[in-house]
Image (tube, rainbow, N blue to C red):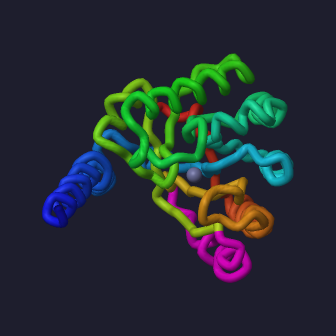
C-alpha cells in the first residue's frame, strides 16, 4: 500500500515537472517565443497586476506628468471591476496586455482553463478599449506545456529588469537606487501597480510610485526616452 502511494507521488511529481517546471525553465533560459528586451533606444516601462482603484490612477497621473507612455498587463477580473481605469489607460495612449483573468499561475491551469483565462481577459479589455489585444505576460512568468501554443496569437513579453517592488520593504530600501541604474536602451522594466496578489504587500505600490517619480525625474532630464509596446515593431 505504502509502495503504491510512493509510486503515485513520484509519478505526480514527474508529471508536474514535465507539464509546468521544465517548460518554464526551457522557455525562459532559451528565450523561446518570448521577448525580454526591445530593439529601440527607449526603455519600456511595464506594470503588472492592476488595475488597482488607488494606485493605478496615481500611476497614470505620474506618467502623464512626465509625458511617458507605458504598458499594463492587467488582470481580467479587475478590468471588469474598474473599466473606467482601463478606458483611461487606452485614451492616454498606453498599451494594455493580458495577465490572466485571475492571477493564477499557468502551472496549475489545464490547457482548457488557460485558454479561457486568455480569451476572457482579451474580451474584457476589448470591451473597454475597442482595441486589438496583442501582448501577454503570464503571472509570475510561469508557463506550462501548452502556453506558447495557446498563446500563439499574442506576443509574450517578459522583462530584462525585475525589482521585487511587490514588497513594501524593498520599496523603502533599495528600489529607487536599483531603478536609477536601469537606463540601458531596450530594457523592459517590470513594476507592479497593485499589491493584492499572493506574496505582495498591499501598500507596496505606494513606494514604487515614489521611486518611479525620482527615476523619471532624473532620467528624463538626461534625455532618456520611454516607449509603450504598441509603438514598436515587435
Ligand atoms: Zn503578476
**Place of residue 60 in the rendered image (x, y in percent of width and height, measured from the top left):** 80, 46
Is residue 65 shown left or right of residue 207?
A: right
What residue is shown at x 70% (from left), y 42% (from top)? 69
User: Residue 216: in sight, yes or no?
Assistant: yes
- Please name whichever residue, 173 or 215, is drawn nearer the observer in this view of the structure: 173
Determine the image quadrant of residue 124.
Answer: top right
State yes or no: residue 108 in magenta. no
* Residue 198 versus residue 79 in the image, above or below: below
* Residue 204 versus residue 173 in the image, above or below: above
- Please name whichever residue, 93 or 140, is drawn nearer the observer in this view of the structure: 140
* Residue 185 versus residue 164 in the image, above or below: above
Is residue 132 shown left or right of residue 91?
A: left
Magenta extent: 167-185
What residue is shown at x 61% (from left), y 49% (from top)? 46
Determine the image quadrant of residue 97.
Answer: top right
* Residue 100 versus residue 41 in the image, above or below: above
Amino acid at each position: 500500500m505504502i509502495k503504491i502511494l510512493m509510486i503515485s507521488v513520484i509519478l505526480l511529481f514527474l508529471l508536474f515537472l514535465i507539464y509546468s517546471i521544465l517548460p518554464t525553465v526551457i522557455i525562459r533560459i532559451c528565450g523561446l517565443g518570448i521577448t525580454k528586451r526591445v530593439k529601440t533606444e527607449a526603455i519600456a516601462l511595464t506594470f503588472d497586476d492592476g488595475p488597482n482603484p488607488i494606485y493605478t490612477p496615481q500611476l497614470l497621473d505620474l506618467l502623464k506628468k512626465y509625458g511617458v507612455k507605458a504598458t499594463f498587463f492587467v488582470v481580467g477580473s479587475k478590468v471588469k471591476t474598474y473599466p473606467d481605469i482601463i478606458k483611461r489607460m487606452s485614451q492616454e495612449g498606453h498599451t494594455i496586455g493580458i495577465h490572466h483573468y485571475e492571477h493564477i499561475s499557468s502551472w496549475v491551469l489545464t490547457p482548457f482553463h488557460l485558454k479561457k483565462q486568455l480569451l476572457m481577459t482579451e474580451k474584457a479589455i476589448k470591451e473597454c478599449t475597442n482595441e486589438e489585444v496583442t501582448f501577454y505576460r503570464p503571472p509570475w512568468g510561469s508557463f506550462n506545456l501548452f502556453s506558447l501554443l495557446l498563446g500563439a496569437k499574442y506576443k509574450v513579453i517578459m522583462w530584462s529588469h525585475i525589482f521585487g517592488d511587490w514588497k513594501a520593504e524593498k520599496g523603502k530600501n533599495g528600489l529607487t537606487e536599483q531603478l536609477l541604474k536601469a537606463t540601458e536602451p531596450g530594457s523592459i522594466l517590470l513594476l507592479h501597480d497593485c499589491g493584492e496578489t499572493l506574496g505582495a504587500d498591499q501598500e507596496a505600490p505606494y513606494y514604487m510610485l515614489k521611486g518611479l517619480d525620482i527615476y523619471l525625474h532624473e532620467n528624463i532630464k538626461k534625455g532618456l526616452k520611454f516607449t509603450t509596446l504598441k509603438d514598436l515593431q515587435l
